[in-house]
Amino acid sequence: MNQEQFWKIRAEKYDELNWVNEKSYIESFVSSTKFDKNDSVLDVGTGTGVIAKAIAPIVEEVIGLDISQDMLEHSNWKDNCYFIKRDIRE
């Protein structure tokens, strides 16, 4: 199985993972940051954008990068979230 096939399969059920649906986990992550309304945040390996969407209300913009187009297709875009298919190693 190549990398693209792996992420295609993983993307289908990614948003069903426990940590994704554990509201207290996401809230703990966001509250531990010092983001500001003027910040631009780069979310590398954004997946379906779970963290990007949680951060979006408290910053100016979030740019989510992910190697998998399938993962990005499962993200729900917000006004200030931008998702780009990119391999950070390139």
Image: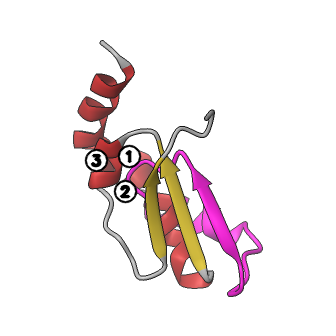
> Quick one: 30 or 24, which is closer to the camera?
30
- Examine the rendered structure and indicate whether residue 34 appears above or below residue 50: below
Specify which label sits upstream in the sequence, 3 or 2.
Answer: 3
The residue range painted magenta reads 23-49
Q: Residue 16 got which mark?
A: 3
Q: Is residue 72 left or right of residue 58?
A: left
Q: Is residue 7 left or right of residue 49?
A: left
Q: Say which quarter of the image contains residue 76.
A: bottom left
**Mark 3 closeness class: few <14, some 14–19, many ≥20 residues within 10 Å:** few
> Is the C-beta separation of discs 1 and 2 under 8 Å?
yes
Q: Nearer the viewer, mark 1 or mark 3?
A: 3
- Examine the rendered structure and indicate whether residue 67 appears above or below residue 59: above
- Magenta-drawn stretch contains 28: yes
Q: Which residue is mark 1?
A: 18
Q: Residue 21 got which mark?
A: 2
Q: Tell me where residue 82 appears, x and y as whole percent.
A: 46, 68
Secondary structure, mark 3, is helix
The residue lying furthest to the bottom in this view is 37
* Amino acid found under the numbered disc labelled 3: Glu
* Amino acid found under the numbered disc labelled 1: Asn
